[in-house]
Amino acid sequence: MPDVTIVVDVLNGFCKEGNLASPHCAGAIPRIRRILERRLQADDALIFLADTHDPHDREFEVFPVHCVRGTHEAEVVDELQDLVLRGHLIRKRRYSGFFETDLEDRLRRLAPQTVTVVGVCTDICVMHTVADLRNRDYQVVVVREGVETFDGPGHPHDSVQEFALAHLRGVLGAQVQTLSL
């Protein structure tokens, strides 16, 4: 069975436009692309997760409106669109890719030995998806260069990113690997 790489929320609404767009997240796109090309060479199956909300989603009580269904913000960035066609796209409406999606069934069918995770935001959707992967006993690799978060009031990029990576490794038990790209 192939291993799996999950690409979390590399969307226009986090990378290019809208209330939550971040240059840190946009800067990760070329690195993520190189990682995905390597994972495809290793015959991984690709699964893209896309944060996609209804216009009055309860998440907007916590975060500004973003990635609304049917908008350009809710689409995977152009730089990865050709790779989406080689994988599978799952739309989600909460932090974890498992909440009310078919991700669990899809992974069960694929039966990967290892799940590699890249994407944004490290401390939110990446972390919650990794937690749920580990709770299901998957071996998880998070590629350090392939995850990123934003900078904002009360959310300082550098310290939040380092906390999230330490939590993924030390608490959730994911392997955080550094690759030479």
Image (cartoon, grey):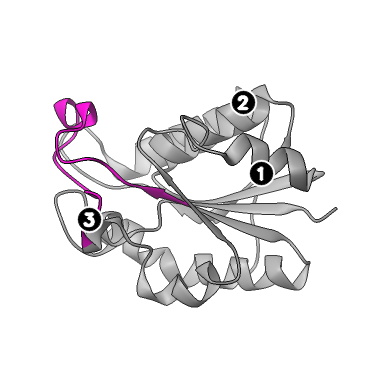
SS at mark 1 in the image: helix
Tell me which amino acid carries mark 1: Arg
Tell me which amino acid carries mark 3: Ala
SS at mark 2 in the image: loop
- Whether tag 3 and tag 1 are in contact, CB under 8 A, the answer is no
Q: Which callout, 3 or 1, points at the residue further toward the start of the chain?
A: 3
Q: Is residue 72 left or right of residue 4?
A: left
- Whether tag 2 and tag 3 are in contact, CB under 8 A, the answer is no
| Number of the front mark, 3 or 1 | 1
Percent across and percent down for residue 58 are 21, 26
Residue where numbered disc 1 is placed = 106
Q: Which callout, 2 or 3, points at the residue further toward the start of the chain?
A: 3
At 48% from the left edge and 30% from the top edge, which residue is drawn? 128
Quarter of the image containing the C terminus? bottom right
* Residue 43 can be seen in this image: yes
Q: Looking at the image, which is closer to me, 48 or 158?
A: 48
In the rendered view, would you say 128 is above or below 5?
above
> Does the magenta stretch mainly form a helix, a strand or a loop?
loop
* Residue 175 can be seen in this image: no
Q: Is residue 78 left or right of residue 7?
A: left
Which label belongs to residue 172?
2
Q: Is residue 161 left or right of residue 88?
A: left
